[in-house]
Amino acid sequence: MEPQMVWANLAVRNLERTTKFYTELGFKLNCSPNDQLTSFKFGANGFVIHFFLKEVIESNMKMEMADAELGAEVLFSLSAKNKEEVDQWAASVNKAGGRLLSQPESFGEGYYGFMFADPDGHRYNVFYM
């Protein structure tokens, strides 16, 4: 069997704040936000991440969702075209209300990037290689 699509479902505390943050970073809405979720497309292939209110997804899935403020549940990687774009991402994340977990820097051989958390603690790294 082969899934037709793969997407991510994450828990958030405030849908309006989440919608504002990802919109300010330039991500495109996947569907109109409602009182349970907001959803965005990421990257050229349109990978979808649904951001559900924590209590909604826990009730619907009958399971407790990890608190992203306490630890990383997953690390999403976002590629950049060059070092300058990495720096632009860092400035945009900071301006939009995200938390820089590291400053843009060179690491490994041929890598340049940084890590950040969204307002709910979901973690991303942005890098150029």
Image (spheres, rainbow, N blue to C red):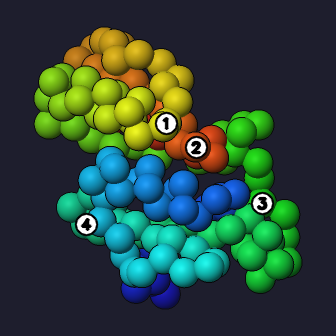
Expressed as whole percent of the image width and height from the top left, the position of residue 121 reads 62, 41
Kind of residue sitting beneath label 1: Gly
Kind of residue sitting beneath label 2: Pro
Which residue is disc 1 drawn over?
98
Mark 2, residues whose alpha carbon is within 10 Å: few (<14), some, or many (≥20)? some
Which circle, 4 or 3, is nearer the viewer?
A: 3
- Whether residues under marks 2 and 1 lie with C-beta atoms below 8 angstroms apart, the answer is yes
Which circle, 1 or 4, is nearer the viewer?
A: 1
First in sequence: mark 4 or mark 3?
Answer: 4
- Whether residues under marks 4 and 3 lie with C-beta atoms below 8 angstroms apart, the answer is no
Question: Gap in Å between the C-alphas at discs 2 and 1?
Answer: 6 Å
| Image mark for residue 113 | none
First in sequence: mark 1 or mark 3?
Answer: 3
Q: Is residue 90 visible?
A: yes
Q: Quarter-wise, where is residue 29 in the image?
A: bottom left
Kind of residue sitting beneath label 4: Asn
Which residue is disc 4 drawn over?
45
| Image mark for residue 65 | 3
First in sequence: mark 3 or mark 2?
Answer: 3
Expressed as whole percent of the image width and height from the top left, the position of residue 62 reads 85, 78
Q: For this rendering, which residue is in front, 25 or 41?
A: 25
For image coordinates 77% across by 52% down, the residue present is 66
Which residue is disc 2 drawn over?
119
Q: Quarter-wise, where is residue 22 in the image?
A: bottom left
Mark 1, residues whose alpha carbon is within 10 Å: few (<14), some, or many (≥20)? many
Mark 3, residues whose alpha carbon is within 10 Å: few (<14), some, or many (≥20)? some
> Left or right: 7 with respect to 46?
right
Question: Gap in Å between the C-alphas at discs 2 and 4?
Answer: 25 Å
In the displayed structure, would residue 88 be above or below residue 57?
A: above
First in sequence: mark 2 or mark 1?
Answer: 1
Label 1: state its secondary structure: loop
